[in-house]
Image (tube, rainbow, N blue to C red):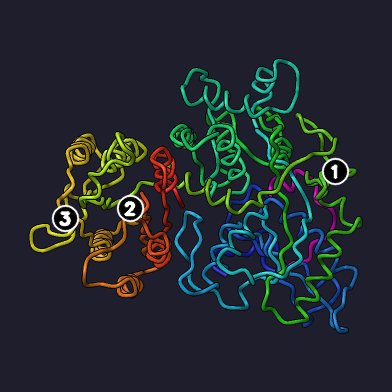
Amino acid sequence: MQGRHTSSGRNPGRRNIRGPLALGVVVALVAITVVAVRVVAADANGCSNGIRLNIAANPDIYPAVREAATRWVDSNPRVDNQCVRVQVDSMAAADVANELAVRAGAGEFINVAAKPVPTPRDEDVPAVWIPDSVSWIGRVRALNKDDFAPDIPSIAMSPVVLAMPEALARTLSGGRPHKMTADELAGLIGRALTGTDKNIRIGVAEPRRDAGSLAGAVLMHEAIATSAAELPKLVAAYRTVRVLPDRNALMQAFGQGQTVAPVSEQAVLAYDAGAPQTPLAVVPLEAGQDLDYPYATVAGKPTAVGDAADLFRKALTSRGYQDIFAKAGFRDPDGHANIGFPAGHGATADPAVGNPLGDVDKISEVLGVWTGAKTPSRLTVLTDATSIMGQPVAPGGPTRLQVMQKTQVDGLKLFTDDSQMAVWAMASGFPGGKDYRELVPMAPLNAAQRNRIDNAVVTSQPLATPTRGLYSSVLAAYKNEQAGWTEGMSNTVLVFTSGSNTADGLTLDDVNLELEKLTDPTRPIRVVLLGFGPDVNLDELNSIAKTTGGKAFKVDRPEDIGSIFLQALLRN
């Protein structure tokens, strides 16, 4: 499996693991960068040719799973009279998810802020995956619902908290330790956003790769974007926070000016166990989220391996292994702290309450906004310019074109300066017999380009023709995006239309077939379509969007177009 490295030490390679791990050792192990570490906890029972159970565990829980595997192997487990040996790999959940997504086939990929990896061999795919959050299971299942066995229990839990220096925690709590409310969190973010409190400097690990920071992004979303109209504030907040590549870098940033970060309680306890110069405090959150460490058995493995995975799962969820996870700073799945739990620095042995990140739609929405806020875009905007755009939405009200003009001008403000944008008009009868016309060529969104786009949008007028070449225009815009496809950008065609294709020539099947031929999973281009008015055929728009991995929206009320447009722009 790509990215795995054998653990180093006096005896590199395979070795037996014996004896308990002190929390300080756990910290040292967790501090290893998110490259994978392989340890075989297998041969203690003399089992060299038995059933091998391969487990990929998230780096934070890996030391505890490794120790538990050694204890279990020492008990001489057997399946069909064969001994079992366990290979534990420390693998970042994002890397395992990336491999499983590629394994799903059909050009599937998952947004983990990394390129799709080569298709893994079956023997390199773990039999058991223990990520830090069930959110990973949902994201992979969105690509292949049959990737895992149905029963996926949690083996441990750690609530997501705010980590910050103890002095700052005392100041923010007013000397009265309590769970931070949503309003207090929104105020904290607001002070960081405006710079009115220089003591508050928020950092996160990349939420597309780190579940603790994803939980933080969800909490920020719920605290700030109380309505779709507040999405620009959320975008600004996401752009303000400092982004680190992983949790290790995030924790190290506390010695480099960072003062606040959403992380698991266990991460704070592990950090403080290393006796840093400035210990961190755990600040619990009223709107609790938690990391729940699911035990997912990967489908498609031999029956004996699946049976061994079931046996080990039963062991991990029994009382006989609770001490291993407790001393490493983890709680039971129900939030209780067992004997040996290293309470302190704001973390108590009182039961913790949280909610796993299991809402797939919410996660998709949050990651969509995050990606849109943090990733530069390369965008071709294709706007309906047929005669219907000159008609009022309602008697005495603005025209459809005026509604879309305001929406586009407002939406332009959401794009980063390092984005690129082009603007096209769509109607039949342009010079050369084309169904589209380039109004503003593709260029970086500097001040001059923004002015060109603003002017083009606000001065545009509908043509006299009612004929709309939607299919040919979308196909041409897609080819234009593909010709200038840029790595590291969200390459997108955004279509505004007030009706269906009414031009002769291409059929819906034709355009979808052509788009399928053009689609390259390694160079993705989304087509996002926003239909406005009663003449829109949402099934038609959905069909085009689905072919490219995009999304279609239908707007019936003019007051809704702004918020839906923002959702379309920021969708992952």
**Residue highlighted by disc 1:** 336
Q: Which of marks 1 and 2 is in front?
A: 2
Q: Which of marks 1 and 3 is in front?
A: 3
Q: Can residue 530 be seen in this view?
A: no
Left or right position of 321 against 443: right
Amino acid at pointer 1: His
The part of the chain drawn in magenta is: 15-29
Element under label 3? loop
Q: Residue at x 82, y 33 (%)?
A: 348
- Viewer-nearest residue: 47 or 354: 354
Left or right position of 130 against 409: right
- Residue 433 point in image, percent of width and height: 11, 63
Q: Is residue 341 visible?
A: yes
- Residue 63 point in image, percent of width and height: 74, 55
Specify whether residue 24 is painted magenta.
yes
**Residue highlighted by disc 2:** 494
Task: Assign the N terminus to one quadrant of the image.
Answer: bottom right
**Residue highlighted by disc 3:** 465
Q: Which residue is drawn at 72% across and 69% down?
A: 297
